[in-house]
Amino acid sequence: MAALCSRTALGTGKSLMQMGLSLNGIYYDPAALIALISREREQTKLPAWKNDIYQFLQAWYGPDEHISLQTSGSTGPAQTITAQKSRMASSARATLDALGISGKGKALLILPASHVAGKMMLVRAIIGGLDLITLQPRLTWQAMNIPLQSYCLAAATPSQLMGLMQTNKKNRGAVDQIKHLLVGGAAPSPALESWLCQCKNPVYLTYGMTETLSHVALRRLAPAPARPYYQALPGIHFEQNQEACLIIHAPALCDGPLHTRDQVKLYTATSFHWLGRLDFVINSGGLKFHPEQIEAALFPVMQKLKRRYMIVGINDKQLGECLTLLLEGQDLEETAQTQLLNDCSKVSQSKYACPRQIKTVSQFSMTDSGKLDRMRTLLAYHKGI
């Protein structure tokens, strides 16, 4: 399939190098687009976010058949990998087909084009013939001043949507102007997930990574009822290894099976329920716990505290690892700690899946792509930072 994409751009009759892009309401063929980039760079110093877009477009329309991508670094050092343009086009077409997007329409780019999620929005606009509206990426939705008009496709992070939810708990109009919203980059809080479930148009959580050229599976949140599982994009299927970790088969995207560190419950060859990262599993008293699952259960209690938190395992002579609630910021008074642990026990999934102690670290560590870096944060705690 990848070779076919390279020749005919997925059935359009044009090669990838012949397909132009509609950018902010104006269509440019490849030559005109490169001329625009050169002209704007000569006339003014471009902001970094726009320069990232132009750098990618120059590379996309350049002679090299590969594009350089940087991994997120969420479970180790960030690395630079290369991807075939034809495979990126295949990924874009798989998403468009899965969502039923065809013909003309406006797409919204509010993610940085320095990372794969932003780059793939550009590719989807090229392959799908969409008019791409580009805005400077911001941490909050309100700060971007998104024009009130209909968009057929957009992608956003949970952090961008959180502020919108907090100020518009009942009004979802800003999201409802988007016919298909992809949410990825990190897991949304239970409160945000519940809020998104009430949207009138389709909203999806994405599962994927840089190595798979963005997402390979989607979990629908809206319209209700939300699905508890991720569904594979066309042409992709899954299996598990002996540790229940997901193995991805995506022949149009990868040379061979991609072995992940994500533990899942596999429903079918094309659907699964995500449990958590094997790297973060805590072994306490002979029982294994996914911190992500415990954190989600504790959210009703922790949202009142208004402090970032995570569940970690700290060495314990009796238990091996002690389930610990790690807070960002200053220490809590002893009475406040006792009350918080008691409140946590009331919402925990079982008496064992509950933190036994509370510790603090001055600041949580984040990856360059904005994800929580659990390993570096725990290391900072042990160093007393």
Image (cartoon, grey):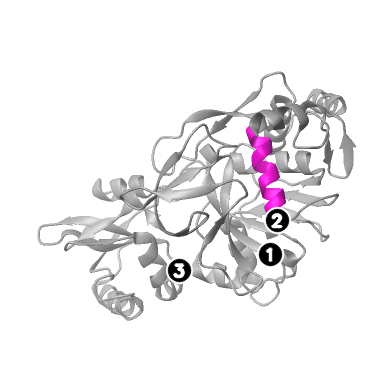
Q: Is residue 347 visible?
A: yes
Q: 326 and 79: which one is in front? A: 79
The location of residue 181, given as percent across then percent down, is 68, 58
- Which range of residues does the magenta coloring cover? 87-98
Mark 3 and mark 2: span between their CA atoms?
A: 36 Å
Residue neighbourhood size for the residue with mark 2, other residues' Cα within 10 Å, grouped as few (<14), some (14–19), many (≥20) = some
The location of residue 154, given as percent across then percent down, is 71, 53
- Magenta-colored stretch includes residue 270: no
For residue 213, above or below residue 263: above
Dot 1 falls on a residue whose secondary structure is loop
Q: Is residue 59 left or right of residue 310?
A: right
Residue at image point 39% right, 61% down: 292
Residue 73: image quadrant is: top left
Mark 1 and mark 2: span between their CA atoms?
A: 9 Å
Q: Amino acid at mark 3?
A: Lys
For residue 63, above or below residue 337: above
Disc 1: which residue: 202
Lower sequence index among marks 3 and 1: 1
Residue at image point 23% right, 69% down: 356
Residue at image point 53% right, 35% down: 254
Mark 3 and mark 1: span between their CA atoms?
A: 30 Å
Q: Amino acid at mark 2?
A: Leu
**Disc marking residue 306:** 3
Mark 1 vs 2: CB contact within 8 A: yes
Lower sequence index among marks 3 and 2: 2
Q: Is residue 271 left or right of residue 321?
A: right
Circle nearer the viewer, 3 or 2: 2
The location of residue 250, given as percent across then percent down, is 54, 41
Which quadrant, please, contains the N terminus?
Answer: top right
Dot 3 falls on a residue whose secondary structure is loop
Disc 2: which residue: 99
